[in-house]
Amino acid sequence: MIENKQVPAVARRMNEVVEMAAPLFVRGEGALLYDEHGAEYLNLNELNVVLGENNRNYVQTMEQALASPLTASGHSVYKRKLIGYLSQTTEGVFSDVHFTSSGSEAVEWAVRLAQKMTGRSEIVCFWHSIHGRTWMSAGMSGIPRRKSGYGPVPAGIVYVPYPICGICPYHSMQPDCGLACIRFLEDTVEYASAHDIAAVIIEPLQASNIQSVPAGYLKALREWTRQRGIFLILDEVQSGMGRTGKMYCYQQEGVVPDILLLGKALGNGQHIAALLLTQTPDKRFTQAIGGGTGDFPHACAAACAVFEELLDRGLLEHVSSVGSFLMESLLELKQQFQSQIHEVRGKGLAIAIQFSGNTTASRVYEGLDSANILYGKDTNTVILKPPYSLTRDQADRFTRMLKELLSINN
Ligand SMILES: Cc1ncc(COP(=O)(O)O)c(C=O)c1O
């Protein structure tokens, strides 16, 4: 950090704001971070640098990539290799790929392509979803704070509830309801749209609150969209690339979307996102949205290192096994503290711990903050998305800490 005396007043004010907002990390190893004063933090909220800090293979790959041609003109060896990994892990079901520099951009690209290719304008989106921070992608997100205060949401967005039995508009429950949520989507489109739907965009596992679609839902949605010539876009910007212990969520449901979106973990901190398409669009559909900056060789190299770690060095299995260990320990805690923990849910290393009320949640937040544990929040809920390198000991350290905090009021 530059000495305050040496910098002009405006920069000094900016420094102060930056210092107040977050710790200054100067070193890291796996899921551990160290600030300028040597304090240690356990990072359980890492959406991007999923290999963990200081991953040797990643650092080495990046050094080599930065010493190679950096231009994105033409193809790079890294881009070729990356396309190979994407094709291999999706079993060749996609015929085309386009890279962008962020998930938001990939979402907008997918929507604009669906509009151009179908000749229709409207998009169906889900409550509580996250799709990005740009105007259209924030508008499509089903989270109020992403939209309020920015004027009207973009035209043509039709929202439906995410299929969670607990908030079912028909108060029905799976498996007896015969997927009433699909009927509700159909009724909403019937009465709340202009019957001009280009695409449905959905996260198979919602990132904001770690909710998954019920079994059979994606298949039914695939059928519903196919029958109407509507694009199905699966947003796996957070749920893909091994987060759930499987490479992608959509494969667990046996469903192939028209467009699959990947991002965040794909670049392990480098700016790269990908759209995988089952149909190669005609040039006249991509003229207005071609180009972009997602496929720089160093960003593609980063993604190759992520695939290498996941596929060749056992990281995918590690996510599964540490994720199961953490989930089992948390379910034991739920048994023990039934009045304080409402629900533990998730897959792999995406886990939500929902508390029964505000009092418990606030006590846990405070305790975790003062223990330098970094985590995500939803209403009365702790959200865990650690780097995939999280060790069993670190997972255990978290559950022991949580147990202590819950014991205070038992
Ligand atoms: C599911 C999902 N889609 C898209 C995005 C947008 O990605 P980005 O932040 O790279 O623009 C996000 C960001 O959080 C996300 O969680």
Image: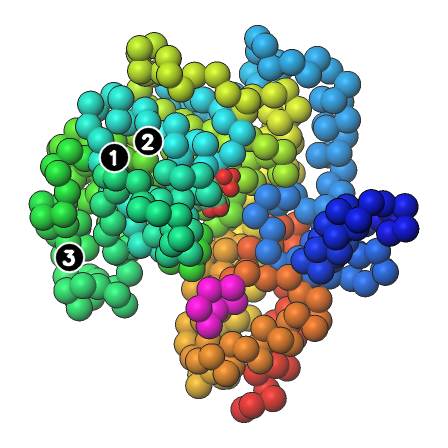
As drawn, is 178 to the left or to the right of 316?
left
Percent coordinates x, y for residue 148 in the rendering: 38, 54
Inter-mark Cα distance, 2 to 1: 7 Å
Name the residue beneath numbered marker 1. 199
The reply to whether callout 2 and callout 1 are in contact (CB within 8 Å) is yes
Query: From the viewer's perspective, is 397 left or right of 215?
Result: right
Q: Is mark 2 within 8 Å of ligand 1?
A: no
The quarter in which the C terminus is drawn is: bottom right
Give residue 395's quadrant in the image.
bottom right
Residue in the picture at 64% in, 61% down: 374
| Label 1 crowd bin: few (<14), some (14–19), many (20+), radius 10 Å | many
Q: Secondary structure at mark 3?
A: helix
Q: Residue at position x 71%, y 66% from top? A: 372
Give the residue type at disc 3: Ala
Compared across the picture, whether 254 is left or right of 333 comes to: left
> Which one is nearer the viewer's eye here, 253 or 68?
68
Answer left or right for 249 relative to 306: left
Residue 180 image label: 3
Label 2 crowd bin: few (<14), some (14–19), many (20+), radius 10 Å: many
Q: Which mark sits nearer the N-terminus, 3 or 1?
A: 3
Neighbour class for label 3 at 10 Å: few (<14), some, many (≥20)?
A: many
Q: Is residue 274 magenta?
A: no
Vertical arrangement, residue 230 with respect to residue 163, above or below: above
What amino acid is at disc 2? Val
Where are the magenta residues, as a range?
A: 377-382
- Image coordinates of residue 72 in percent, x first then y, are 60, 15
Label 2, on which residue? 111
Image quarter for residue 226?
A: top left
Q: Is residue 5 above or below residue 404?
A: above
